Image (cartoon, grey):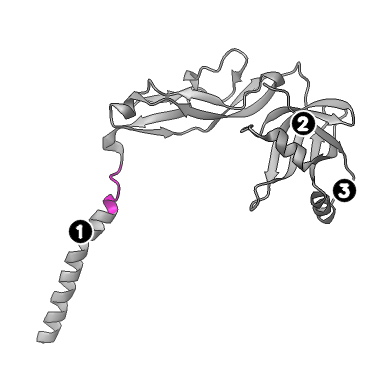
Amino acid sequence: MDQIKIKAEPRTEQGTGAVRRLRRTGMIPGSVMKMKKGGVELIKLPAHDFMMAMRGHASKQLLVTLDMNGTEVPALMREMQNDVLAGTPIHVDFSEVSLTEKVRVTVPLYLVGEAVGVKLGGGVLEQTLRSVDVECLPEDIAEKFEVDVSGLNVDETLFVRDLKLGEKQTLVTRGEVPVAVIKAPDDIPAAGGAAAAAEAAAPEVIKKGKEEEAAKEAK
């Protein structure tokens, strides 16, 4: 994994108003959970530099090096809050880590390959698990795991225990949890089935209504 270095500095700004003013100056408020000293240190990051460093990285749990006024601190980015409308980061939380001690992280799963059950069997691929929890050294954190489903046939299920992640990551998620399944064509509801049934029933309702009106007029 390429090293991600981010400049940061301590901050004293706290409270909603102060943090808003901080963001208007082009800074992002954040925090670092200290490993040795304990407690949490408040920090601020240049918004432009931070977003440039994050370009091309899909995961929100990354190993970074915080440059705290010349002192490099290895840290795990634990959570990033984004503005709902603009999509830009508004707060980032880090945890200081030791490069020689394992950490637990959540890694997203991406399915790759065309399943034989879809290509030849007419089934539909359904992903039932989007991420797994693993333990590994900070420098071995993967941003994502690509899962090859090309060998999956109709009515077959891929479980967590079937994943091949390598020796550097230890799975924490239970092995019996399903990751993906190929559903048979017979198990897939026909598109618009309910709508078609409603349309078919509509003429009967209209016909019955007209017959009732005619009967009333005859009286």
Q: Nearer the viewer, mark 3 or mark 1?
A: 3
Can residue 137 be seen from the camera position used here?
Answer: no
- Which callout, 1 or 2, points at the residue further toward the start of the chain? 2
- Which callout, 3 or 1, points at the residue further toward the start of the chain? 3
Q: Residue at x 69, y 29 (%)?
A: 62
152 lies left or right of 94: left
Task: Tell me if residue 163 comes above or below residue 6 in the rendering.
Answer: above
207 magenta-colored: no
Task: Tell me if residue 88 comes above or below residue 176 in the rendering.
Answer: below
Q: Nearer the viewer, mark 3 or mark 2?
A: 3
Q: Residue at x 84, y 39 (%)?
A: 43
Residue stretch in magenta = 189-194
Labels 3 and 1 touching (C-beta < 8 A): no
Query: Picture coordinates of residue 41 (x, y %)?
Result: 85, 37
Type of amino acid under label 2: Ser
Give the quarter of the figure containing the N terminus: top right
Q: Which residue is mark 2?
A: 95
Q: Residue at x 83, y 54 (%)?
A: 21
Disc 1 versus disc 2: distance between alpha carbons? 61 Å
Query: Picture coordinates of residue 15 (x, y %)?
Result: 83, 52
Query: Picture coordinates of residue 23 (x, y %)?
Result: 79, 49
198 lies left or right of 38: left
Q: Which residue is mark 3?
A: 13
Along the viewing direction, whichever of 70 and 15 lies nearer the viewer: 70
**Corner quadrant of residue 57:** top right
Q: Which residue is mark 1?
A: 200
Crowd class of label 1 (few under 14; some 14 to 19; many from 20; radius 10 Å): few
Type of amino acid under label 1: Ala
